[in-house]
Image: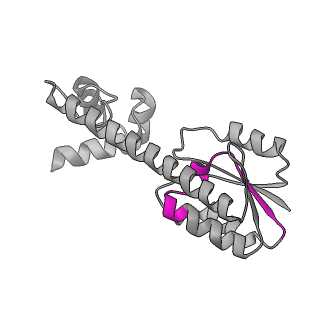
Amino acid sequence: MIYGYARVSTVGQDLEAQIQQLEANGAEKIFSEKFTGTKKDRPEFTSLLAELKAGDTLIVTKLDRFARSTVDAITTVKELFGRGVRIHVLNMGVIEDTVTGRLILTIFSGFAEFERDMIVERTQEGKAIAKQKEGFKEGRPKSYTEKQLNHAIELLGDHSYNEVAAMTGISKSTLIREVNKRKA
């Protein structure tokens, strides 16, 4: 059987392009998840690995969707080769269980890890520069002004959380968090 695996790192990202590529390349059953690649215990990937058996083929669109580091890629591929599973990385080709195939896997997974590390490094450099600027606040910008929150809190004197949420558009959880913050 031909299995596909698609993964994106965040809930806001879309799996559809990967799934379409996997289907176009013959994937009969696709496991997909929105889960960071930095964690080894990805639930769908774990389920996929448990299902693979001799004669099966695993297709992924890119190596970085499959493994979180060079060591992880090599370890996982060796284990799958030992079980008789073929691996096809669409932007690389079929990874062969040969000396050359293992060398290519090691080189490409090293580049994938290097690329990920460079992204993290550039992000950290950008944050360090941003922190030096006046008025920098880390995190997401506030959704509501202090005036809007004050008005909503005043309304809570005569109305329930659900009613105030409906009137102001401020979620019940945000209202509760604001009330608790002001009590502290």
Q: Residue furthest bottom?
A: 82
Left/right placement of residue 19 relative to residue 77 reads right
Residue at the image point whose x is 60% and y is 64% from the top: 43
Asked if residue 143 is among those painted magenta in the image, a careful observer would answer no
Residue 121 position in % (x across, y down): 32, 42
Q: Nearer the viewer, residue 18 or 155?
A: 18
Left/right placement of residue 172 relative to residue 7 reads left
Q: Looking at the rendering, which quadrant does residue 83 occupy?
A: bottom right
Q: Specify whether residue 42 is in view.
A: no
Q: Nearer the viewer, residue 181 or 98?
A: 98
Q: Quadrant of the N terminus?
A: bottom right
Q: Residue furthest front?
A: 99
Residue at the image point whose x is 70% and y is 76% from the top: 82
Residue 64 position in % (x across, y down): 56, 49
Q: Looking at the rendering, which quadrant does residue 56 occupy?
A: bottom right
Residue 25 position in % (x across, y down): 82, 45
Residue 97 position in % (x across, y down): 71, 65
| Residue 13 in the image: above or below residue 141 | below
Instruction: Report how many numbered discs are placed on residues in the image.
Output: 0
- Magenta-highlighted residues: 55-72
Q: Looking at the rendering, which quadrant does residue 163 occupy?
A: top left
Asked if residue 66 is among those painted magenta in the image, a careful observer would answer yes
Left/right placement of residue 141 relative to residue 170 reads left
Residue at the image point whose x is 29% and y is 37% from the top: 139
| Residue 145 in the image: above or below residue 123 | above
Q: Nearer the viewer, residue 101 or 184?
A: 101
Residue at the image point whose x is 79% and y is 73% from the top: 53
Q: Specify whether residue 47 is in view.
A: yes
